[in-house]
Image (tube, rainbow, N blue to C red):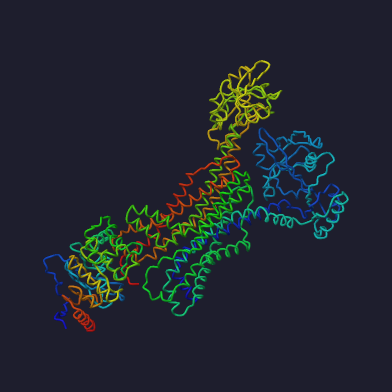
C-alpha cells in the first residue's frame, strides 16, 4: 500500500486548490447536467466544483456512468450545461455561442481522442498542423520541431495514418492537440484503443508534454494504471466529485476507485 | 434473410430514396415517351375515324368509277354511296394565296365529317364553303367572292406537258368547322359540290386518261339493313364492276369505319410513331444509364457502410450467396418501387400536358385523357428494375467479399475501394484509341473522300466507341484530373485543401459521380457545338447562295426581257418598313456582249451598283470586291455560259451606247453582271431601276419583315416580285435552333439525374464522415468552414464533370460537324461560348446547391461525436 491516502471530500467542502494564488487553467462551479425530464430525469453531473491547476497532468477517474466524460465535455465546451459555470482560464465557456466556442477550440483547447481521429487522407505532419491552418495562422516551426522531438515522430511525418501503428497515431494526435499551444488539452481515454505497451508509451509522452513543455492536460480514464501517470487524480462518482489523490500510484488509484465502489454501495 | 434485408432497408431508407429519385426520373421519362407515342397513334386514329364519321361501310383499295358507284348503289340495303374526294386547289383573295384541300359534298349530307358553322353548304357551280381560319385569313364573309386558280392539262405529249391556268370566281356560301379533327393535318377542308370537285380532278388528267389512284367509297345503309350481308353484297357487286372495267379487284376492301381507322393507325404505329418513340427513347436510355451510375454509387456506399453488419452475418453463418441475394433483393425492391413511382409521375405529367394542351388551341384535337396501355406500365417497370439490378451487381459482389473477420475490426470509416483492374484499363484504352482513329477516318471519308453519308456512319461508330472507352476508363484518369483541380483550389486555403483531399479518398465514387454528369454534358456540348458549327458553315454557304436578304424585282421572267422601271417611291416605302436597314436601287439594262473567246450572240443583264452600296447590302461583299470603274463583275455561272475568262476585256453594246471593261469573274451567284452606275450610264443613260436590294437589320426577323415588304409592294399594284432569301435563311436557322432545343431538352433529363447523383454522393460522404466532421469541429473548424468544405467538394465534382464534358463535347461536336457538313465547304470550328458558359455555370451552381442539404446535416454534428467510441 502506498502512503498516499484516499480522503473522501464532504459535499460542502471548498473546491480543492480554491485558495491558490494563480488562476487555475480550468475550473467548474456548481456545474450540473441533467438529461430527460420529470421521472426520467438523470443527473449526469450534480453541482460539481473543481479546479485544475495549470502546468499539471490531471486524471479524472471514475467507473462507467459516473459522469467523468460529461464533466470533460462541459469543461471543454463540447456540450451545454444545465446550470453552473465552466471556465478555461478566466473565460467562461458555459453559454458561449458556436462561433466563440470554435475560436476557443482553435487557440485555447486541444483534444486527444480514444479513436485517434486522424484524417486518413493527410500525412502525419499535415494532420498535426491542421488546427493552425484552419485558424488561418502560421505554424510555429520551432514549436513543431520541439513537439516532434518530444513525441519521437521525426521519421513518421510523411506517413499517412494507415501506415502508422496505433501508438504512433495517438502520438500524432497529441502533437495535433498541442500544436496551437493551447491552455489545456483534454484527453478522452487516450489509451483505450491501445495495447498496454503503446498505452504506456503514450502516457509517458503525455507526462513529458506536461513536465518538459509546461502544458496542462486533463485526461479522462477508467484505468488506474493510466491515472497513475498523472500528477493528480480527481475521482468522480454519481455525478459528484468523490475524491482527490495527489501523486497517485497505480495502487492508490485502484484503491481510490475501489473505495468509490464502496461509497457507491453505501 | 429477407427480414434482415428489409430491416436494413428501413435503416437506410433516406439513402435509398435519394438513389431512387434517379430511377423515378428515368422511368417517368420512358413512360411519358410511350404515352406520347400513344397520343400520336390515337390522334391519328381519331382523325381517320372522323373522316368516315356518318358512313356505315367504307369500300376502297381499288379505283372505282361511276359504273362501280352505281353498282354499289344498286345493292339492297344501301342508301347512298359516294366517292370521298379531296382535291387540293389554289385559292386567292387580295394578296393572299392559300393551298387548300377541298372536299366534295356527299349526296347524303350526314356523311360529311364537317359541321356547318355559318351559311349553307355549296349547292351549285361557283360555290364553296371554307374552313373558319381560311375565311379569316382572306378576310371574307359568307356571300363574298374568292378566286380559284386551277390548272388544266391541255396537252400531254411525250415530253411536253402543257397546262392552262384558269381563274374562276367562287362565292363563299358557308363556313365549315372540323370539330373532330378529320382534316386537322391539312388545316381543315373546304367543301364544294361533288360535280365541281370531280371536274377539277378530271382536268388534271390527260383527255381520256383514267385515274389509277385507289378510291374511297363511303357507303350509307338503310335503317335495319344487315351490315355483314350488305358488306358481302357490295364486295361482290363492286368486284364484278371493277373487273368489268378492266381493273384488278384483288385489293378491294369493304370495311367498317372502325376497322379502317384501326388498320391505318396500325400502319402508323409502324411508321411515324415508332420513329418518334425510338428517337426519344434513345435519350431516355441515356438518362437511365446515368441513373444506373447513380444507383451503383449508392449501393457501393451502402455495402461499404454495412461492412460490419455483413461481416457479422457471415460470422453467424450467412453464406456469400445469401449476402449477394440480399443486396440484389434490396435493389429489386428499390427498382420496383421507384419504377412504379416513375410511372405514376410520368402518367401524371402526360395527363397534365394533355389537359393543358387541349386547353390551348393547337389545331389538333387531342385526346382528353391518356391511354395507359400495358406497354406503358410494363416497359418502364421492367427497364427501371433491370437497370437498378444491373447497377447493384458490382456492389453485390463487393458484399460477398466482406470477410467475417471484418466484424472484429474497429469500426473505421469504410476504406476506399481498390482501383479497377488491368483488363479494364486495356479495354478502355483500346476502345478510346481505336474509336478516335475510326472517328477521324469517318471525317476523312466525309471531307476528303466526299462521301458524307458513309462518313457520318463511320464517325458515329468511332465516336460512340471512343466515348464508351473514355467512360469505362474514367476511373483511371478522372481522379487524376480531380486531383489536379483539387491542387489548384487547395492552394486557396485549408478548407479547400480538405475538400480536395476528400474528393480523392474514394476515387471510384468521385469518378462515377463526375462521369454521370460528364455523359450528359458531353452530349449537350456536342449538340450545341455541332449546331453552332453547322450554323456557321451554313451561314457562309447561305451568304454565297443568297447574297441579298430581299430582292424586289420587276424582272419577272428573269431574262430581263420584260423588266420595267420600279414604281416611284417604292424604295422609300420599303425603307420605312420596320426591320429594313438599307434599300439600294439597282438600275439595269439588257445588253449584247462581245469579247475575245466569248460565245457569239451573248446577251446579259447589266446592273449598276456602287461598291459602297454593294458592301452595305450584300451578305458576301467579297464577291463584288473587284467592282470599280472599268471593271465588270461576272458571276461564275454567267462566265461559264458565255465562255468568259477572268481578266479579259469585254465590250457591251446597245443601240444607244457601248462600254469596254475588264471582266472579273467571282463566285457571285446572280443572273446579271455588275458594273458601277457611271459605267452603266455610258451603256444606257436611261437604264431603269428594275430591282431593289433590301438589307435587313436582323436576318433572323425575315419571317416577319418580308411579309411587311410584300404588303408594301402589293399596295403599289405594280407587277413586281419579292424574293426573300432571308426567309429561307431564317428557316434554316430556325430548323437548327429548334432541333437543338429539343435535343438539349431531352438530354437535360440526364443532366438533372447526374446532379441528383452529386448531391447523393455528398450526402453519403457526410454520413460516412460523421466522426471526422466532429473531429474537425473539435479541432477548430467553424460551421462556415465545414459548409464551405462541402461546397468546394460539390463544385469540384460537378465542375470537373462539366468541364471535361464540355471539352469532349467540343471535340465530338467539331468532328461530327466536319463529318456531316464537310461537303458544304470548310467546316467551321466554333466554340459556342454562350452554351459552354451556361453549362459550366449550371454545374457550378448545381455543385453548390447539391452541398446545401448535406452541409446542413453535417453542421448539426456535435463535436462530442468525435469522442464516441462507436
Q: Is residue B575 visible?
A: no
Q: How many marks?
A: 0
Residue B354 image-quadrant placement = bottom right
Q: Is residue B461 above or below residue A207?
A: above
Foreground of the two, B485 or B756? B485
Percent coordinates x, y for residue B506 in the rendering: 42, 62
Image quarter in which the N terminus of chain A is found: bottom left
B57 lies above or below A210: above
Relative image position of residue A172 (x, y in whole percent): 28, 66
Return the x and y of residue B111 as percentages of the image width and height. Answer: 75, 50
Along the line of sight, the residue nearer the viewer: B635 or A5: B635
At x 87%, y 49%, the residue is B246
Q: Is residue B847 visible?
A: yes
Rendering quarter of residue B617: top right
Q: In x, y percent, where is residue B309?
A: 43, 74
In the rendered view, does B51 fall on the left or right side of B277? Answer: right
Amino acid at each position: 500500500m502506498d502512503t498516499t491516502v484516499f480522503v473522501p471530500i464532504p459535499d460542502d467542502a471548498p473546491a480543492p486548490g480554491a485558495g491558490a494564488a494563480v488562476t487555475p487553467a480550468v475550473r467548474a462551479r456548481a456545474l450540473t447536467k441533467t438529461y430527460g425530464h420529470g421521472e426520467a430525469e438523470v443527473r449526469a453531473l450534480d453541482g460539481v466544483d473543481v479546479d485544475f491547476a495549470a502546468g499539471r497532468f490531471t486524471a479524472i477517474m471514475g467507473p462507467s456512468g459516473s459522469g467523468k466524460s460529461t464533466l470533460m465535455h462541459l469543461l471543454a465546451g463540447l456540450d451545454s450545461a444545465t446550470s453552473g459555470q465552466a471556465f478555461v482560464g478566466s473565460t467562461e465557456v458555459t453559454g458561449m455561442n458556436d462561433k466563440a466556442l470554435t475560436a476557443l477550440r482553435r487557440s485555447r483547447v486541444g483534444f486527444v481522442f480514444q479513436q485517434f481521429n486522424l484524417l486518413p487522407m493527410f500525412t502525419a505532419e499535415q494532420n498535426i498542423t491542421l488546427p493552425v491552418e484552419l485558424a488561418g495562422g502560421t505554424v510555429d516551426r520551432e514549436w513543431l520541431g520541439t513537439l516532434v522531438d518530444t513525441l519521437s515522430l521525426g521519421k513518421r511525418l510523411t506517413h499517412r495514418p494507415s501506415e502508422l501503428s496505433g501508438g504512433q497515431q495517438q502520438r500524432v494526435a497529441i502533437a495535433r492537440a498541442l500544436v496551437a499551444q493551447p491552455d489545456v488539452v483534454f484527453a478522452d481515454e487516450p489509451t483505450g484503443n491501445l495495447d498496454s505497451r503503446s498505452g504506456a508509451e503514450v502516457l509517458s509522452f503525455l507526462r513529458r508534454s506536461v513536465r518538459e513543455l509546461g502544458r496542462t492536460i486533463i485526461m479522462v480514464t477508467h484505468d488506474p494504471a493510466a491515472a497513475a501517470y498523472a500528477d493528480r487524480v480527481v475521482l468522480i462518482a454519481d455525478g459528484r466529485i468523490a475524491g482527490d489523490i495527489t501523486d497517485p500510484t497505480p495502487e492508490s488509484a485502484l484503491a481510490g476507485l475501489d473505495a468509490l465502489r464502496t461509497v457507491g454501495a453505501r | 434473410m429477407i427480414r434482415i434485408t428489409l430491416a436494413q432497408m428501413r435503416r437506410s431508407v433516406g439513402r435509398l430514396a435519394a438513389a431512387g429519385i434517379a430511377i423515378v426520373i428515368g422511368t417517368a421519362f420512358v413512360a411519358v415517351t410511350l404515352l406520347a407515342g400513344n397520343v400520336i397513334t390515337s390522334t391519328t386514329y381519331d382523325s381517320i375515324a372522323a373522316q368516315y364519321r356518318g358512313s356505315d361501310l367504307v369500300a376502297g383499295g381499288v379505283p372505282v368509277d361511276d359504273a362501280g358507284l352505281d353498282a354499289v348503289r344498286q345493292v339492297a340495303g344501301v342508301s347512298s354511296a359516294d366517292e370521298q374526294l379531296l382535291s387540293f386547289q389554289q385559292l386567292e383573295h387580295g394578296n393572299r394565296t392559300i393551298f387548300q384541300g377541298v372536299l366534295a359534298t356527299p349526296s347524303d349530307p350526314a356523311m360529311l365529317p364537317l359541321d356547318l358553322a355559318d351559311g349553307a353548304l355549296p349547292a351549285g357551280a361557283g360555290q364553296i364553303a371554307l374552313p373558319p381560319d381560311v375565311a379569316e385569313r382572306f378576310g371574307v364573309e359568307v356571300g363574298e367572292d374568292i378566286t380559284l386558280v386551277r390548272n388544266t392539262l391541255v396537252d400531254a405529249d411525250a415530253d411536253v406537258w402543257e397546262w392552262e391556268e384558269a381563274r374562276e370566281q367562287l362565292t363563299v356560301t358557308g363556313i365549315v368547322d372540323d370539330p373532330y379533327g378529320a382534316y386537322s393535318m391539312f388545316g381543315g377542308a373546304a367543301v364544294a359540290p361533288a360535280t365541281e370537285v370531280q371536274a377539277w380532278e378530271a382536268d388534271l388528267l390527260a383527255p381520256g386518261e383514267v385515274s389509277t389512284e385507289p378510291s374511297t367509297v363511303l357507303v350509307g345503309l338503310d335503317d335495319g339493313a344487315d351490315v355483314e350481308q350488305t358488306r358481302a353484297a357490295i364486295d361482290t357487286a363492286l368486284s364484278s364492276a371493277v373487273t368489268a372495267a378492266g381493273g384488278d379487284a384483288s385489293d378491294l376492301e369493304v370495311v367498317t369505319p372502325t376497322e379502317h381507322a384501326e388498320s391505318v393507325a396500325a400502319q402508323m404505329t409502324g411508321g411515324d410513331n415508332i420513329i418518334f418513340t425510338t428517337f426519344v427513347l434513345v435519350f431516355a436510355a441515356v438518362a437511365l444509364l446515368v441513373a444506373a451510375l447513380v444507383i451503383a454509387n449508392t449501393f457501393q456506399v451502402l455495402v461499404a457502410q454495412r461492412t460490419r453488419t455483413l461481416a457479422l452475418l457471415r460470422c453467424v453463418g450467412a453464406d456469400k450467396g445469401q449476402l449477394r441475394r440480399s443486396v440484389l433483393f434490396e435493389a429489386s425492391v428499390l427498382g420496383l418501387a421507384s419504377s412504379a413511382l416513375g410511372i405514376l409521375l410520368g402518367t401524371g405529367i402526360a395527363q397534365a400536358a394533355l389537359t393543358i394542351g387541349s386547353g390551348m388551341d393547337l389545331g389538333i384535337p387531342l385526346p382528353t385523357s391518356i391511354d395507359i396501355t400495358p406497354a406503358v406500365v410494363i416497359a418502364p417497370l421492367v427497364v427501371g428494375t433491370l437497370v437498378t439490378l444491373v447497377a447493384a451487381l458490382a456492389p453485390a459482389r463487393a458484399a460477398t467479399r466482406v470477410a467475417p473477420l471484418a466484424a472484429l475490426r474497429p469500426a473505421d470509416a469504410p476504406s476506399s475501394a481498390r482501383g479497377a483492374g488491368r483488363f479494364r484499363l486495356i479495354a478502355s484504352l483500346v476502345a478510346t484509341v481505336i474509336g478516335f482513329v475510326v472517328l477521324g477516318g469517318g471525317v476523312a471519308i466525309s471531307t476528303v473522300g466526299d462521301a458524307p453519308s458513309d462518313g457520318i456512319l463511320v464517325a458515329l461508330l468511332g465516336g460512340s466507341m471512343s466515348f464508351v472507352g473514355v467512360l469505362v476508363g474514367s476511373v483511371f484518369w478522372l481522379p487524376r484530373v480531380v486531383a489536379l483541380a483539387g491542387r489548384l483550389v487547395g492552394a486557396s486555403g485549408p478548407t479547400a485543401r480538405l475538400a480536395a483531399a476528400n474528393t480523392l479518398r474514394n476515387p471510384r465514387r468521385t469518378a462515377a459521380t463526375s462521369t454521370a454528369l460528364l455523359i450528359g454534358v458531353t452530349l449537350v456540348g456536342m449538340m450545341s457545338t455541332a449546331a453552332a458549327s453547322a450554323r456557321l458553315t451554313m451561314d457562309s454557304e447561305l451568304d454565297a447562295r443568297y447574297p441579298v436578304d430581299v430582292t424586289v424585282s420587276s424582272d419577272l421572267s428573269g431574262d430581263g426581257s420584260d423588266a420595267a422601271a420600279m414604281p416611284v417611291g417604292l424604295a422609300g416605302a420599303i425603307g420605312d418598313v420596320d426591320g429594313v436597314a438599307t434599300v439600294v436601287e439597282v438600275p439595269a439594262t439588257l445588253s449584247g456582249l462581245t469579247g475575245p473567246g466569248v460565245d457569239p450572240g451573248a446577251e446579259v443583264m447589266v446592273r449598276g451598283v456602287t461598291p459602297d452600296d454593294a458592301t452595305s447590302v450584300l451578305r458576301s461583299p467579297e464577291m463584288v470586291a473587284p467592282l470599280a470603274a472599268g471593271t465588270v463583275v461576272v458571276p461564275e455561272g454567267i462566265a461559264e455560259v458565255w465562255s468568259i475568262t477572268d481578266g479579259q476585256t469585254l465590250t457591251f453594246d446597245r443601240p444607244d451606247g457601248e462600254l469596254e471593261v475588264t471582266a472579273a469573274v467571282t463566285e457571285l451567284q446572280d443572273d446579271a453582271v455588275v458594273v458601277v452606275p457611271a459605267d452603266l450610264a455610258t451603256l444606257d443613260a436611261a437604264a431603269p431601276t428594275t430591282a431593289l436590294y433590301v438589307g435587313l437589320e436582323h436576318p433572323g426577323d425575315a419571317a416577319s419583315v418580308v411579309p411587311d415588304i410584300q404588303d408594301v409592294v402589293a399596295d403599289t399594284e405594280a407587277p413586281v416580285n419579292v424574293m426573300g432569301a432571308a426567309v429561307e435563311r431564317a428557316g434554316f436557322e430556325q430548323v437548327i435552333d429548334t432541333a437543338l432545343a429539343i435535343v438539349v431538352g431531352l438530354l437535360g433529363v440526364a443532366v438533372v439525374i447526374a446532379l441528383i447523383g452529386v448531391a447523393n454522393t455528398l450526402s453519403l460522404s457526410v454520413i460516412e464522415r460523421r466522426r471526422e466532421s466532429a473531429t474537425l469541429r473539435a479541432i477548430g473548424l467553424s460551421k462556415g468552414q465545414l459548409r464551405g468544405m462541402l461546397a468546394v467538394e460539390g463544385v469540384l465534382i460537378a465542375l470537373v464533370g462539366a468541364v471535361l464534358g464540355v471539352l469532349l463535347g467540343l471535340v465530338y461536336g467539331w468532328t461530327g460537324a466536319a463529318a456531316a457538313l464537310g461537303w458544304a465547304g470548310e467546316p467551321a470550328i466554333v466554340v459556342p461560348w454562350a452554351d459552354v458558359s451556361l453549362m459550366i455555370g449550371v454545374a457550378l451552381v448545381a455543385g453548390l446547391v447539391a452541398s446545401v442539404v448535406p452541409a446542413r446535416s453535417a453542421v448539426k454534428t456535435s463535436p462530442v461525436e468525435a469522442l464516441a467510441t462507436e
